[in-house]
Image (cartoon, rainbow, N blue to C red):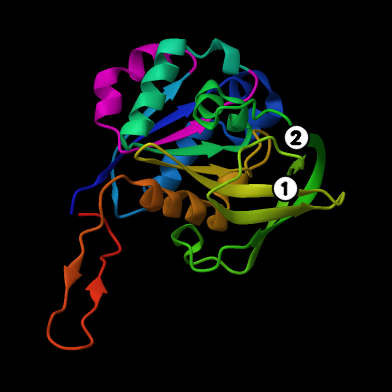
């Protein structure tokens, strides 16, 4: 079985400048995401990049070897190099998977692939509880999850969220203030699969929560570009396709 090679971009600004963010993610959000993905038997190499080094890390050579990319950004979207953005988007069109997390909706990469300004939504920071409801039962991204997940505290997001109509709506979130949000959406661009997932503010330890780690790992498998190998049982009238869970 071929392993899945991953690149993770994290702005890594708040974790160096904000005390609450430092306490939540002392080694950076990218490290927390990488640690979660390392629990998957499908994981291969993991490359991490931050705003400080993304132009030298996210080269064409690196991206050509990347099967799935995770993207987290917040207040420094405008400082991301346009050539890197173009390379990432081109690789998605070629088939590289992309997982966009939380405020990464405002990134140049996500906006270019969506074809619209995706920064319009309601938000506030008030330590609200979030209930994440599964609305696409049976989808690979929700495998192993209960019908709903409780996030004890998270940044509140609310509609209207200015994204194109998703190909699939995976999660809807409810917050204590009454807001609802399309918090898990899939898109296809070219040969690539994209998953946007909302939970995960920089000052809340959301990425350590087991259910969230399961979502990150399931997204790895779902966005992976490998074709699932299909074999056929031709032994009789009840012939059926058998699709292995892991890519080969």
Horizontal arrangement in the rendering, residue 218 relative to residue 167 (left or right): left
- Could you give the CA–CA distance between mark 1 and mark 2, rounded to whole angstroms? 9 Å
Say which residue appears at 59% left-offset and 49% top-offset.
184
Q: Mark 1: which secondary structure?
A: strand
Image coords of residue 225 (percent x, y): 30, 44
Q: Is residue 137 above or below residue 79?
A: below
In the rendered image, the quadrant that contains the N terminus is: bottom left
Residue, disc 1 = 181
Please state the extent of the stretch shown in magenta in the rendering: 51-75
Q: Which mark is residue 121?
A: 2
Horizontal arrangement in the rendering, residue 114 relative to residue 118 (left or right): left
- Look at the image and say whether residue 52 sits in the magenta stretch: yes
Q: Residue at the bottom extreme?
A: 237
Of 225 and 142, which appears nearest the observer? 225
Q: Which mark is residue 171?
A: none
Of 75 and 238, which appears nearest the observer? 238
Q: Is residue 40 above or below residue 98?
A: below
Say which residue appears at 67% left-offset and 48% top-offset.
182
């Amino acid at each position: 079985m071929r392993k899945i090679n991953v690149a993770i971009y994290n702005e890594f600004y708040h974790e160096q400048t904000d005390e609450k963010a430092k306490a939540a993610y002392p080694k950076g959000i990218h490290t927390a995401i990488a640690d979660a993905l390392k629990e998957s038997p499908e994981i291969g190499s993991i490359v991490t990049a931050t705003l400080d080094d993304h132009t030298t890390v996210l080269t064409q050579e690196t991206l050509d070897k990347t099967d799935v990319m995770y993207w987290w950004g917040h207040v420094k979207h405008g400082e991301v190099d346009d050539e890197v953005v173009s390379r990432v988007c081109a690789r998605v069109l070629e088939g590289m998977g992309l997982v966009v997390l939380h405020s990464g909706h405002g990134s140049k990469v996500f906006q270019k692939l969506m074809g619209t300004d995706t920064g319009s939504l309601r938000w506030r920071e008030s330590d609200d509880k979030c209930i994440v409801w599964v609305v696409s039962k049976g989808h690979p991204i929700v495998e192993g999850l209960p019908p709903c997940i409780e996030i004890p505290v998270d940044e509140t997001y609310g509609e209207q969220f200015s994204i194109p109509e998703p190909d699939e709506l995976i999660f809807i979130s409810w917050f204590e203030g009454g807001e609802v949000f399309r918090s898990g959406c899939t898109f296809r661009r070219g040969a690539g699969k994209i998953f946007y997932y909302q939970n995960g503010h920089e000052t809340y330890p959301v990425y350590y929560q087991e259910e969230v780690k399961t979502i990150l790992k399931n997204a790895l498998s779902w966005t992976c570009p490998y074709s699932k190998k299909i074999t056929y049982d031709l032994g009789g009238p009840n012939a059926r396709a058998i699709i292995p869970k892991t890519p080969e």
